[in-house]
Amino acid sequence: MADFTGKTALITGSGRGMGRSHAAILAARGAAVVIHDINEAWAEETARRIRDKGGRCLVACGDVSKPGDMQDVVRRGEAEFGGIDILINNAGISAERAGLDGITEDLYERMFGVHVKGTIFTTQAAVPGMIARRSGRIVNISSIWGMTGHHFGATYCAAKAAILGLTKAWAKEFAPHNICVNAVAPGAVKTEMQVEVDGLEAVKAQAKAIPLGRLAEPEEMSYPVIFLASSEASFVTGQVLSPNGGDTIVGV
Ligand SMILES: NC(=O)c1ccc[n+]([C@@H]2O[C@H](COP(=O)([O-])OP(=O)(O)OC[C@H]3O[C@@H](n4cnc5c(N)ncnc54)[C@H](O)[C@@H]3O)[C@@H](O)[C@H]2O)c1
């Protein structure tokens, strides 16, 4: 089990769901964590749970789609803990059902603003410190739908696919600085987001179609994310790991 003592991790969108789980497990393994979300009350609740268990954390809120906010979040994390070693670009919004005719500029701006712009400019804020320390781990959260597509969710799928492109390009760009960049593309996970998108009954039906016969618990995504964030993944970069219960198994 990797130990994160002496490391600092910034997890965007860690006010609830998978981000909260990533933050809690990293903190339990010794990392100082920067809890970020657009919803301050949720972020404070994550921090309270971590502090109750003796973990170290800072709450730094902001809108991930606003580069100025994310510069501020990164600067606050660096000032408090001395540097960001691990960045998990996790903040996300749910896929909204829209066929081609239903795609509006507003939908496009929101999907690409949170997922693509957010990932780009948070990374831009965090990477100079990693380069200065010649060490860093970036884990970008994509989605199974970024690989497979999904009916009537084209803008979400496209934004999540873009994250895979960013991951591979940055893995090459930052390799000379000993910064590893990977992506996790979750299958269906039991979070508030999943229920919001599909409703509980649809989620149950969806689970039946997954070879393992169920949705993942948030912490089942955290372990792969945390592996990629750890020293144990020192030769892994530019890769996409999709924990999805077997949903994308294909023949030879
Ligand atoms: N739940 C799933 O089944 C699933 C599957 C594949 C991928 N994902 C991806 O995993 C990530 C986490 O999803 P989750 O299910 O935990 O969702 P969630 O809704 O429970 O958590 C997402 C968090 O991001 C925050 N956020 C949203 N917009 C923001 C903004 N503009 N600025 C700052 N924070 C913002 C939210 O407030 C929330 O706390 C997302 O990127 C999501 O797209 C989820």
Image: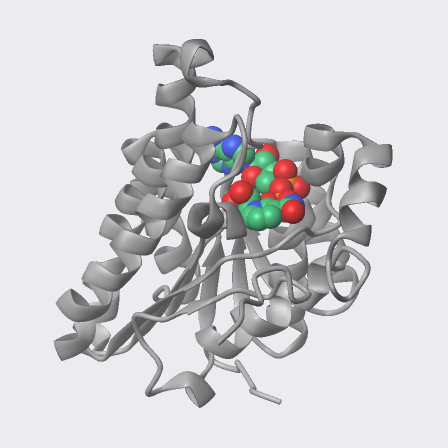
Q: Quadrant of the N terminus?
A: bottom right
Determine the residue positioned at 53% across, 64% down: 242
Determine the residue positioned at 17% across, 69% down: 172
Residue 199, position in %: x, y? Answer: 79, 30
**Can residue 16 be seen in this snapshot?**
yes
Looking at this view, is 136 or 203 the one in front? Answer: 203
Residue 101, position in %: x, y? Answer: 42, 10
In the displayed structure image, the side of residue 2 where residue 62 appears, left or right: left
Determine the residue positioned at 79% across, 61% down: 52
Residue 197, position in %: x, y? Answer: 68, 30
Looking at this view, is 51 or 213 the one in front? Answer: 213
User: Eyeballing the image, is 121 above or below 107?
Assistant: below
Task: Report the number of discs.
Answer: 0
In the displayed structure image, the side of residue 248 where residue 228 appears, left or right: left
Residue 137, position in %: x, y? Answer: 36, 71
In the displayed structure image, the side of residue 68 where residue 132 appears, left or right: left
Quadrant housing residue 29: bottom right
Q: How is the image coloured?
A: one colour
